[in-house]
């Protein structure tokens, strides 16, 4: 599957600037950050700790108001929460007093709409949660809770899915399983995905493009194309080409060396 090539980006960040006022003083989280995301593309964002990755993602969702600049969805400003934009947080955030089905249906209750049961059943089957509708969050593993959170986000059929390091708390085996699941769902149900992660390996496995942010105040420092064919296998992740790409990204991040000068870096030819 290849990313879309529409002339208008699906999601466009234009000179996004975000300043915060705190008791200890003011600080600038984002400074004129700009980025285009094509339709049906998976873009991962990595960078030094505190560089503003999550601030950028929340601004894309419309949940954080920018101090300056703008974010456009299909050419129209994102001025608040939009039904076309789904989000999966670092924690699954399932309501403990509701079973799985009730948690997934919760957004529909808020919107006053009837859930699309056939679509939700398809998603539950797709993520391996078929038959768990009556289970409560305490009865589900961490991986299962995050799968439920993905189903909840996709149940509204968003055209953009924002994921804020959703697998960071999972063990390495479950994390790899979830990465494969996200790719499989994306191949089956084309959606534009922006994925925040601290794992360079995870970013390479999932993405069409990896965006490296500079140290705070955050800007886009570099962009790396990831040309490896899909579906991706663990064997590809063990190749020299992936190692070289991972090392290049790591060198950009270590020590905050990622400069604030935009650059596009092309990787080696795809591995067959």
Image (cartoon, rainbow, N blue to C red):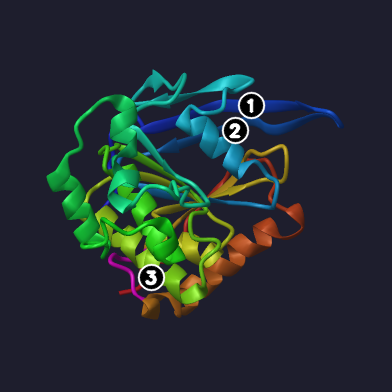
Residue at screen point 37% across, 57% down:
136
- Residue 262 x %, y %: 60, 41
Q: Are marks 1 and 2 in contact (CB under 8 Å)?
A: yes
Q: In this view, does 143 lie above or below 57?
A: below
Residue that numbered label 2 is attached to: 33
Question: Residue 75, located in which quarter of the rendered image?
Answer: top left
Residue at screen point 58% across, 26% down:
15
Residue at screen point 46% across, 32% down:
61
Residue that numbered label 1 is attached to: 17
Between circles 2 and 3, the one closer to the viewer is 3
Residue that numbered label 3 is attached to: 177
Between circles 1 and 2, the one closer to the viewer is 1
Sequence-wise first label, 1 or 3: 1
Q: Is residue 268 visible?
A: no
**In this image, 150 relative to 12: left or right?**
left
Sequence-wise first label, 1 or 2: 1
Question: Residue 140, located in which quarter of the rendered image?
Answer: bottom left
Sequence-wise first label, 2 or 3: 2
- Residue 17 x %, y %: 64, 26
Cα distance between the residues tagged 2 and 3 = 32 Å
- Helix, strand or loop status at disc 2: strand
**Label total for image:** 3
Q: Specify the segment rendered in magenta.
A: 228-233
**In this image, 179 relative to 39: left or right?**
right
């Amino acid at each position: 599957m290849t990313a879309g090539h529409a002339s208008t980006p699906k999601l466009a960040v234009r000179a996004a600037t975000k300043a915060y006022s705190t008791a200890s003083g003011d600080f600038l989280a984002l400074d004129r950050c700009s980025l285009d995301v094509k339709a049906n593309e998976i873009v991962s964002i990595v960078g030094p700790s505190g560089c503003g990755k999550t601030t950028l993602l929340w601004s894309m969702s419309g949940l954080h108001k920018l101090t300056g600049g703008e974010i456009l969805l299909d050419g129209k400003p994102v001025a608040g929460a939009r039904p076309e934009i789904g989000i999966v947080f670092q924690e699954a955030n399932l309501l403990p007093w509701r079973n799985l089905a009730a948690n997934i249906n919760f957004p529909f209750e808020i919107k006053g709409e009837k859930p699309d049961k056939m679509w939700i059943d398809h998603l539950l089957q797709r993520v391996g949660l078929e038959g768990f509708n009556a289970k409560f969050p305490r009865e589900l593993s961490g991986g299962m809770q995050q799968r439920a959170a993905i189903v909840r986000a996709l149940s509204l059929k968003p055209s953009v899915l924002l994921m804020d390091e959703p697998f960071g708390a999972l063990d390495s085996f479950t994390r790899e399983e979830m990465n494969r699941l996200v790719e499989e769902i994306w191949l089956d149900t084309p959606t534009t995905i922006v994925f925040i992660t601290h794992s360079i390996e995870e970013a390479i496995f999932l993405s069409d493009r990896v965006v490296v942010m500079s140290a705070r105040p955050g800007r886009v420092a570099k962009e790396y194309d990831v040309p490896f064919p899909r579906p991706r296998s663990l064997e590809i992740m063990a190749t020299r080409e992936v190692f070289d790409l991972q090392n290049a990204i790591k060198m950009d991040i270590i020590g905050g060396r990622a400069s604030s000068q935009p650059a596009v870096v092309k990787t080696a030819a795809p591995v067959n």
